Image (cartoon, rainbow, N blue to C red):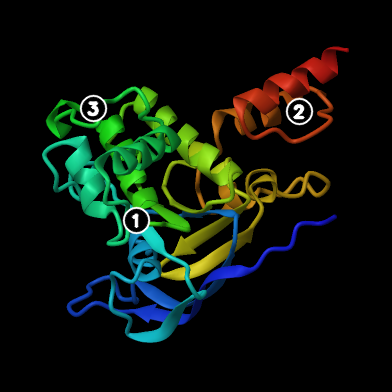
Amino acid sequence: MSRIFSPVLQLEDVTVDYIGNATGHPALDRISLVVEQGTWVAVAGDNGSGKSTLAKAAAGLSPLTDGKVITADGIRVHMVMQHPEIQILGETVYEEIWLSLPEDSPAAVTEREAQMKRYLRESGLQHVPLHTPVRLLSGGQKQLLNIACCLAAGADVLLFDESLSMLDPSSRSLVLEAASRLHAKGTTILWISHRMEELVYADRILLLEEGRLAYDGTPVDFFYGNAVTGQLSPCESFGLEPPLTVQTVKELHKYGVDWPERPLTPDQLAKAVNLLCR
C-alpha cells in the first residue's frame, strides 16, 4: 500500500519585506509551498537568500508583509535555532525540559521524570542525568537538549535553522542522527542549511535565491541533474559545490565507471561500489 501524506504546513504567497532592507528585494518574495506530514524538507541558499526568514515565518516568529502561513489542526511547529544556548533558560537539564512541558503534564515527580527521560532518550541524551547543569553540556548536547524540549512541548514539525553551524563535526553527526531517528518515527523535519552534505538526508530540497523559490525537487535530481544530457546539475548551475560523495561519483564516471545508482551519502557510495565489484 502506498503511503498517503497530508499537509501539515502551508505557505501561500508569503512575502516578508523588512523596513530598511538594503538588498533591493524582499527577504521572501511570494513564496508558496506545502510541507507534508512525515517528510524531510531541506531549504538551501546563499547568505541573504531568505532561508532563516523562511524558518521564522514557518514557525510563526516573523510578521508577514503579505500572504499567510497555515498549519493543520493540532500541528505544533517548534524550532532548534542556530546558537545552542540562545533558547535555553533552565539551570539544569531537568529545569529546561520542565519549562517546555505542557500544563497537563504528570503531577507526580516519578511519572514526570520518566517522561523527561523518554524525551532525552529520543533526542540522544539518554546517558545525561536529569539534574546535570546545562553549563556542563557540550554545544552538541545543548542542541540535543533543545530537541528534547521541542519533543516535550509536543512538536509535530521540527524546524532546524542552521542548527549545526556552530558545532564541531562529531556534534553535527549526533544532531543529524537524532533528526534521522525522529524522522524515521514520523516526525516532519524542515531543515535549513547552507551545507550541501546536510541536504542529502532530505526527501525534498528547496533552493532560495534572493527571496524566491528557485528549485523544488529531489536531492538526486538536485545534485546529479540529467545524466543523459550531461548538463550541469541544479546544484552546480547555482554555483554550489556538491557533497564529496557526488563529486567522487561524477569524477569516476568520467573514467567510464557505470554506476548502478546515484549515491548521495558515503554509506550509499560504499554499497554502490560493492555492487560494481561483484
**Residue 157, placed above or below residue 245:** below
Mark 3 sits on what residue?
Answer: 138
Q: Which label's residue is closer to the chain start, 3 or 1?
A: 3
Q: Amino acid at mark 2?
A: His
Which residue is found at the position 39% from the left and 40% from the top? 119
Name the residue nearer the viewer: 231 or 121: 121
**Residue 207, placed above or below residue 223:** below
Q: Which label's residue is closer to the chain start, 2 or 3?
A: 3
- In this view, the residue farthest toward the bottom is 66
Q: Position of residue 155 (x, y in %)?
A: 42, 57
Left or right: residue 192 versus residue 96 is right
- In this view, the residue farthest toward the top is 277
The quarter of the displayed image where residue 209 is located: bottom left
Q: Which mark is residue 153?
A: 1
Mark 2 sits on what residue?
Answer: 253
Q: Secondary structure at mark 2?
A: helix
